[in-house]
Image (tube, helix red, strand yellow):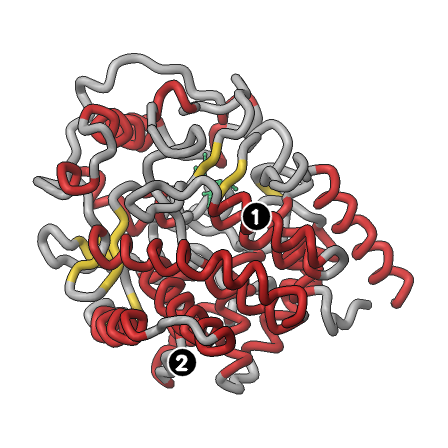
Amino acid sequence: MQAIKDELDRRAIQIMRDNDRGGYTIPTHGLYPYQWNWDSAFAALGFAAFDPARAWRELEILFSGQWLDGMVPHILFHRPDPGYFPGPDVWQCRGPLPSSGITQPPVSLSFARRLYEANPAMGAVPVRMLFDPMRRWVQWFMAWRSHEGAICIAHPWESGRDNAADWDKAMAAIDPHDVGTYQRRDLDHVHAAMRPTKDDYDRYIWLVQRGRRMGWHAPSLAVDQPFFVADPTMTFTLMRGVRDLIWLGEQQGLPTASLWNDLQLLEKGAETLWNPEISAYDSRNALDGEFSGTLSNASFLAWYGGIDRPELAETLMQVLRPLPYGVPSLALQDERFDPKRYWRGPVWGVLNMLVGMGLEEFGYPQGPALRQMTGRLIASHGFAEYFDPRDGAPAGGGSFTWTAAVWLAWAGVGVELG
Ligand code: 9WN
């Protein structure tokens, strides 16, 4: 068994090295040729298992793309690559590096704490360097993405769960008739049945065009938002991030007072996302207050955010019962469930890990169980972007950085194979 585990470790490290572009890591060759925000945070955790200095470098380069207003972009376009659309010419942003104009879940705040805890002597300098940029990113979220304390997305790509059923109703309100023609590149790499539809893409691009017209100026974008949905992914990852940033600040004697206020507001906001009809946390359209009625893997991030809710554990057990590999991005019982199309059914190592870490911290047996399921999933089906939740069949891009990182940082640690 140890030999199999060693071989998987070796392959995971090789994937991370192959996707390393010198200080930053791409998610996978071809489909995603740039630095993505939350992918990089997971990459840092993966590197921490075999090259801690390189792990900090990943986060430092991510934050070198931070905008003056505090936002940390969801993509940094370090070197041009015609294989991805929409590229820097479409976004037309004016940050310190060519970038997109939206953000992604701030898991990097929490992963910085993990890096620090693993090696406080090495972490002291980077923490002192990153603390203020991280705090300014939190302030940006609270200023421009908060609705009653819950954190909203202004584009489906911000959530990281881009194509989730959660956004369907809110997206339907956008009329993209004037979007014009454009050439998608994702379909050159992955089968159309696994990717978003043209109707969705028209709206994604329409929202980018709106941002560009307004010069990506946050106060202008906030007026008459066409899409603004409170998201459990954002809310719980920021809540956890703020807690961990406070912890880091206290370790290094840095100012944390404003973060305590943010945390209080986020805790109130999270409760506005509890949907009694599905007995779980749900996304909620901030424009009309409507819940989306979607049981997704993000519905179970509350523990990761630091909130225990025993009814949620019952809902989780029902969702997990028919499935061998962890939390699906949409519950099997949902009529919109689609096992291969991304974020509409498949299972992701990264979400299994966040949900599992939270459950482990609160002492639920489902936490270690999720870790085992994810370990066995990767051991038997490889380092794919995501997997069919019924049989583990790999889907999306291959040789994926964050799946390798999840193996090295969590799923492969203590896994029982065989
Ligand atoms: C758009 C890189 C990213 C992930 C997201 C995932 C997918 C991009 C795309 O890939 O999004 O940002 O083009 O589909 O949904 O979570 O960060 O791996």
- Is any part of residue 282 visible from this angle? yes
- Who's the residue at 14% across and 57% down the image? 290
- Is any part of residue 279 visible from this angle? no
- The image quarter in which residue 279 lies: bottom left
232 vs 178, left or right, is right
Residue 345 image offset from top left, x and y in percent:
45, 51
- Give, as a three-letter code, the residue at label 2: Glu
Name the quadrant of the N terminus.
bottom right
Which structural element holds mark 2?
Answer: helix
Number of callouts: 2
Q: Which residue is mark 2?
A: 314
Residue 241 image offset from top left, x and y in percent:
42, 66
Identify the mark at residue 155; answer none if there is no mark.
none
Instruction: Give the answer, above or below, for where 312 lies relative to 396.
Output: below
Q: CA distance from mark 1 to mark 2?
A: 25 Å
- Give, as a three-letter code, the residue at label 1: Tyr
